[in-house]
Image (cartoon, grey):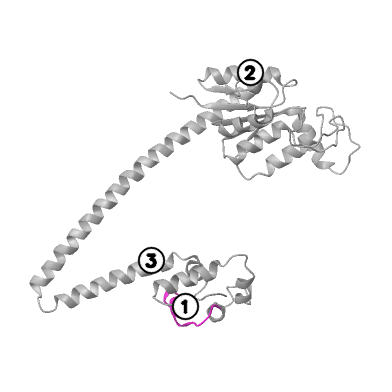
Amino acid sequence: MARPQVFVSSTYYDLKHIRASLEGFIESLGYDAILSDKGRIAYDPDIALDESCYRAAKEADIFILIIGGRYGSETSESVDVDKSKFYERYESVTKTEFLSASKEERPIYILVEKAVYSEYETFKKNRENDSIEYAHVDSVNIFTMLDEILAKRRNNPMHQFEKHTDIENWLKEQWAGLFRELLDNRNSNKKLVSLSDKVEHLSEINSSLQTYLEEVIRTVNPDGSSEIIRAEHAKLSESQLKKEIMEVQLIESVTGHTCISYEKIVEIIKNASSMEEIADSIEELSNGSVVKNLYKYWKSSATDINLIGVNKVRKLLGLPSFKSM
């Protein structure tokens, strides 16, 4: 059975004891710990060493980033910099490993030394002050990396630690929650499959009932049955058409946020000769619930979503599309 691969990214010398403890913890759970200093990365002789690390980070199932007081070495693609200068900016191997895993949407867990995070709070209040000396970090790049991580909207859970047991306890809770979520999703998928089977079965029953009822109508009323059946089919077609039109974002927005009814907006689109005419009619009937100069607002949009929506409705109604705004 394949074992989950957990990539551990951090600087080495200042965090080697944490890395060793974390390796043991990961292996005790039955996972494979991927650490560069343990020879767990297959290095390709045709590319730079750090490029092999980025590839391994992308391919791992889980990514752990540990941030301590050192920022680390620059990448092979970086211009040589003087790392002894605290405010020198550059990309490190550790940061690029994080970015590589993030791009591949790997589950990421970020651990920051408490002392480092405390100084980060000080840095946030003194961003423009380059005369401050920080006791626990060797580069301002650590703070800018934290800026980037915290700016992400998701997949950036962060926890502060002082000792390795803080890390282990947090990861146990996080991975237990992840496993529970996977089980819930599995059960939900089973329910969806079951529901899909039931819907398909109901559809077959409905089709059989329709055929049966049409035969009954033909038997009871042979002269008027064709007209009755034709009228019922027309109602079903109209209902399906309304459903498809209401799914168009423009129609949903207009009927949901103005006093304009479904029938009225469809009439406007059906009889209009241009997008401007449609916009003017909506603006006139909305009682001030839409922006002024609606057509101008549509034209200033970065996308043609309203034109696309109108043309979808016109296509459903059997009408020609508008070529432009």
Q: Is residue 194 left or right of residue 221?
A: right
Mark 1 burial class by Cα count in 10 Å: few <14, some 14-19, many 20+:
many
Mark 3 burial class by Cα count in 10 Å: few <14, some 14-19, many 20+:
few
Please give the residue where the numbered disc 3 appears in the rendered image: 243
Q: Is residue 135 left or right of residue 214?
A: right
The amino acid sitting under disc 3 is Lys
Q: Residue at x 88, y 41 (%)?
A: 129
Q: How far separated are the C-alphas under marks 2 and 3?
A: 60 Å
Q: Position of residue 204 (x, y in %)?
A: 22, 55
Quarter holding residue 88: top right
Disc number lying in front (2 or 1): 2
Q: Say which label, 2 or 3, has the lower sequence index.
A: 2
Residue reaching furthest to the right:
131
Compare residues 139 and 188 and report the one nearer the observer: 139
Residue 115 higher or lower than 273, as above or below: above
Whether the magenta-drawn stretch holds residue 263 is answered as: yes
Q: Secondary structure at mark 2?
A: helix
Q: Residue at x 73, y 38 (%)?
A: 145
Residues at circles 1 and 3 in contact by the CB criterion of under 8 Å: no
The amino acid sitting under disc 1 is Ile
Q: Position of residue 67 (x, y in %)?
A: 71, 29
Q: Position of residue 68 (x, y in %)?
A: 74, 27
Segment tinted magenta in the rendering: 260-275
Mark 2 burial class by Cα count in 10 Å: few <14, some 14-19, many 20+:
few
Please give the residue where the numbered disc 1 appears in the rendered image: 269
Main SS class of the magenta portion in the image = helix
